[in-house]
């Protein structure tokens, strides 16, 4: 039988009502056999996530302060969930042990992990699935890095013959038995690891949005959602700020060739977004582009020197100065006698004159200037490879809006075009590109 591994995020499990929706989703498809829950997240916008409350308990304990008030709020939330679900379960003993351990300084990773641990026990009880403590199957090295080679065989052995299970997300343990966690949002990673161990047909990641959108809905009014995106495209878009999924969640399933399906717990009927390795041509996006994302806060150093192209080692000397100054560059567009380097402004802030002086000394340019307030936009799409005129349309839309393009960089994969513009043009540029490539396409 096909297997689906399903991960539910914090907002999908924030209270009993949300948990019931998740349980209905799980029960509605018998292939949903392995469930990875997050800790209860926010019920409303200024609510506090259980994980954040647990981090706070740990911080108080480390300062030898009393954790009782914050811890009672946590216990109260779990007890309410149990009561509202109407299940026959008591977490009193578990809660008491956790309160004691946190007070005795078991540490931040132990404290934070308990959100998922307790939620896992509740959800397993509700579904009648076996509960498997992630500390017994997800292996970390002592330096805190996840060890996939040791985890996979351990998981496969433990899950052999177990047809249905709940395995909490976000944590595991090192070989000394200390609880270790992934970085924030890490339940996504656990889901991916489990999916790869059981060779799932799909890894469903349930959240509070119906997948990825073509552009940021705060900028573009009701943008279309992306139905299929490749891992490579996703990487380009995530790097530029589109966040739905933890970055490390991609690798385990990608290697195993398992697609990820981002789904909305509040609208299970929506298809969501499929993240896949390759897309067959006929299923390709009807738009040339898959998504638009971007970031502000970049700066450029523009350097000019006649005959620089024939000066051996010119680029290397400029780059050496940046490396010594701890500046990591994003792009390096160049002309015959000009060279620019683009990097996050925060990396040079307060040291502008010093870095410029070092470059002057290294390459004696005729002209050098620092330009800040730059935004980078990434227009990403596998469709660009097979379509002519993409760049022309993109720049025509910028020109009509009187947006000055400062930099253009097309990756060799022809999967993305990065353009540098002034920060004040950022929103308008995204809207124009969206109009050109999505709105203007006939339905
Ligand atoms: N509960 C953890 C966090 O808030 C992990 C997760 O939800 O994925 O970061």
Image (spheres, rainbow, N blue to C red):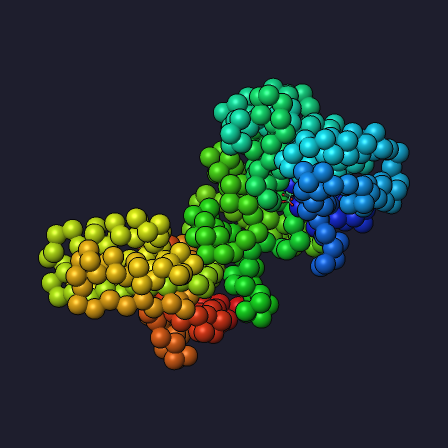
Residue 242, image x and y in percent? 52, 56
- Image quadrant where one finds the N terminus: top right
Q: Nearer the viewer, residue 251 or 145?
A: 145
Q: Residue at x 58, y 65 (%)?
A: 217
Residue 305, image x and y in percent? 16, 65
Q: Quadrant of ligand 1?
A: top right
Q: Nearer the viewer, residue 152 or 413?
A: 152
The reply to whether residue 66 is in sight is yes
Would you identify the image quadrant in which residue 200 lies?
A: top right
User: Is 38 on the left or on the right of 154, as rendered?
Assistant: right
Q: Nearer the viewer, residue 141 or 59?
A: 59
Q: Nearer the viewer, residue 204 or 120?
A: 120
Vertical arrangement, residue 368 with respect to residue 183, above or below: below
The reply to whether residue 51 is in sight is no
Q: Residue at x 72, y 52 (%)?
A: 48
Residue 259, image x and y in percent? 53, 41
Q: Residue at x 51, y 41 (%)?
A: 248
Residue 150, image x and y in percent? 52, 23
Would you identify the image quadrant in which residue 360 lies?
A: bottom left
User: Is 141 on the left or on the right of 56, as rendered?
Assistant: left
User: Is 425 on the left or on the right of 303, as rendered?
Assistant: right
């Amino acid at each position: 039988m096909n297997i689906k591994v399903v991960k539910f995020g914090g907002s999908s499990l924030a209270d009993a009502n949300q948990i019931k929706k998740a349980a209905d989703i799980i029960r509605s498809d018998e292939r949903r056999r392995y469930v990875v829950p997050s800790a209860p997240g926010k019920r409303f916008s200024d609510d506090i996530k259980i994980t954040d409350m647990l981090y706070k308990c740990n911080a108080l304990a480390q300062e030898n302060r009393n954790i009782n008030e914050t811890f009672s709020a946590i216990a109260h939330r779990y007890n309410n969930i149990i009561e509202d679900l109407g299940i026959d379960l008591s977490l009193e003993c578990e809660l008491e042990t956790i309160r004691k351990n946190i007070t005795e300084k078991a540490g931040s990773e132990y404290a934070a992990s308990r959100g998922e641990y307790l939620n896992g026990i509740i959800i397993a009880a509700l579904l009648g699935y076996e509960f498997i403590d992630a500390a017994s199957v997800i292996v970390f090295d002592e330096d805190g890095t996840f060890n996939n080679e040791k985890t996979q065989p351990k998981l496969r052995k433990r899950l052999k013959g177990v047809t249905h299970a709940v395995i909490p997300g976000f944590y595991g343990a090192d070989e000394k038995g200390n609880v270790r966690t992934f970085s924030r949002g890490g339940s996504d990673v656990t889901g991916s690891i489990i999916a790869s161990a059981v060779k799932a047909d799909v890894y469903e990641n349930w959240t509070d949005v119906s997948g990825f959108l073509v552009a940021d809905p705060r900028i573009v009014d009701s943008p279309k959602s992306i139905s299929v995106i490749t891992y490579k495209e996703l990487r380009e878009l995530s790097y530029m700020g589109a966040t739905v999924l933890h970055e490390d969640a991609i690798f385990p399933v990608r290697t195993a060739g398992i697609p990820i399906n981002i789904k909305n717990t509040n609208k299970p009927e929506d298809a969501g977004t499929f993240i896949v390795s390759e897309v067959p041509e006929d299923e390709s996006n009807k738009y040339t582009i898959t998504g638009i994302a971007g970031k502000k806060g970049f700066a450029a150093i523009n350097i000019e020197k006649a005959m620089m192209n024939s000066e051996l080692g010119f680029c290397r000397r400029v780059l050496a100065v940046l490396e010594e100054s701890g500046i990591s560059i994003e792009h390096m567009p160049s002309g015959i006698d000009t060279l620019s380097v683009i990097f996050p402004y925060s990396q040079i802030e307060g040291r502008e004159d010093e870095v410029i002086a070092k470059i002057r000394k290294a390459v004696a340019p005729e002209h050098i200037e620092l330009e800040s307030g730059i935004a980078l936009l990434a227009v990403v799409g596998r469709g660009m490879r097979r379509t002519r005129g993409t760049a022309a349309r993109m720049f025509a839309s910028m020109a009509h809006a009187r947006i000055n393009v400062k930099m253009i960089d097309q990756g060799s994969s022809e999967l993305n075009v990065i353009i540098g513009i002034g920060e004040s043009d950022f929103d308008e540029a995204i809207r124009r590109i969206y109009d050109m490539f999505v709105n203007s396409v006939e339905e």
